[in-house]
Amino acid sequence: MDSSKDTLHTLLHSALFQPKEQLQAIKENTSRLLIGIPKEIALQERRIALTPNAVQVLVANGHEILYEQGAGKGANFSDREYTDAGAQICYSANDVYKKSELILKVAPPTLDEIELMQPKQTLVSALQITVQPKDYMKKLSEKKINGIAWDYIQDDDGVFPIVRSMGEIAGTTAILIAAEYLAQGDYSRKAMLGNVTGVRPTEVVILGAGTVGESAARAALGLGATVKVFDESIYKLRRIQSDLGRRFYTSLPQPDLIGEALRTADVAIGAIRSKRGQTPVIVTEDMVTKMKYGAVIVDVSIDNGGCFETSRVTTHDKPIYINHQVIHYGVTNIPSRVARTASHALSNIFAPILLNFGAHGSFEAVLRKYQGVRNGVFMFNGTLTNKYLGKAFNLPYKDLDLLIAAIS
């Protein structure tokens, strides 16, 4: 018996010095991120960049989330949901900006918010070039900020995922808005948007066959409406019919044809996105005067000026006005009307990007590996890297790839 014990003891002792199989995978050069989520203060902005579910995932991966009290209220997320997910509550915007390494916002920071930012922080937000004051970029540059515009981030297929996602929401919501005002109100037609047996279906005219136009067309067709789509690109018109799997009226935006379609339309959706920033006006006031009493115009393009001559900006508090007996809806940032849905869509895209930031250990490493994120960078260590911004603000700019190579 003693001999057996001695043998077992010898084997166990020997086993201590044998090489063991590695059971835990070796992680990449990971680093903990301090991610700040300040409350959005821009007019009509109700979305939040990360939902509690996304916060929980990021915290589980070792990151810290600094969340300003009340930041999720506009999207109907409570502070309790964020604390339960592992976020740390901050009771002022100053605390968020002071302690965070990366600031995550939906709307661009105001000049006052830029003052709160710390040197060499990373900023992820929308850019919205056309509405920024002249000294905007200069103030970011003075803080040596690393700036990423989420509206310019691309995925592996070269698509702008956040812009597309917000476009889908805006297009679908535009039809729901039109349905609401077509049926209700003193000036409405008291009509249902759709199709009922024995009753003429609602006619919907959509200007633009991009993501917004396609989503609006899908929603309107789903309700049984008759849809007419106008776009200057034959390719887009073919694609929208192919994607929706059915034939319907499509045309180039010729004034006579647009005017004829609008005369019988119950709803008109403006969904034109211009590469030049300012949306061209393709529906004149004279065309609007010939529309039906109580017809509804939802100008999604109002963010960039609008494509109806009679369009003007309205607010969520007072979303409509009547012009030539036609109901006009001119609220900018339509996705903010359905802030909870839009926040989920944003969060689904932001969370994986932030996990990549942590996994690769540094801002520069992420930019080297991910072309899509690099495409969104407009400022690197305070140096402007976007030539369009350089020209718009009359500021010098440098090539991002050269700047990254210089620190390799």
Image (tube, rainbow, N blue to C red):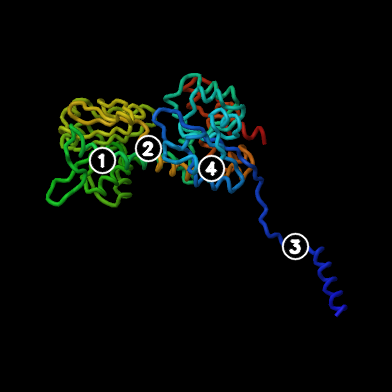
**Dot 3 alpha-carbon crowd within 10 angstroms: few under 14, some 14 to 19, many 20 or more:** few
Q: Nearer the viewer, residue 248 or 18?
A: 18
Which label was assigned to residue 20? 3
233 left or right of 348 in image: left
Numbered disc 1: secondary structure: strand
Kindly identify the residue that appears in the image at 47 percent across and 32 percent down: 126
Q: Which residue is mark 1?
A: 229
Residue 399 in view here: no
Figure quadrant of residue 385? top right
**Inter-mark Cα distance, 1 to 2:** 22 Å
Figure quadrant of residue 368? top right
- Seen from this angle, which residue lies furthest front? 80
Residue 372 image position (x, y, % from top left): 51, 41
Viewer-nearest of discs 1 and 4: 4
Q: Earlier in the sequence, mark 4 or mark 3?
A: 3
Numbered disc 2: secondary structure: helix
Q: Nearer the viewer, residue 96 or 103?
A: 96
**Dot 4 alpha-carbon crowd within 10 angstroms: few under 14, some 14 to 19, many 20 or more:** some
Viewer-nearest of discs 1 and 2: 2
Q: Which residue is mark 2?
A: 335
Q: Earlier in the sequence, mark 1 or mark 2?
A: 1
**Inter-mark Cα distance, 1 to 4:** 47 Å
Viewer-nearest of discs 3 and 1: 3
Kindly identify the residue that appears in the image at 15 percent across and 30 percent down: 290
37 left or right of 342 in image: right
Q: Which residue is mark 4?
A: 83
**Inter-mark Cα distance, 3 to 1:** 66 Å
* Amino acid at the residue labelled 4: Thr
Quarter the N terminus occupies: bottom right
Q: Residues at badges 4 and 3 in contact (C-beta under 8 Å)?
A: no
Q: Earlier in the sequence, mark 3 or mark 2?
A: 3
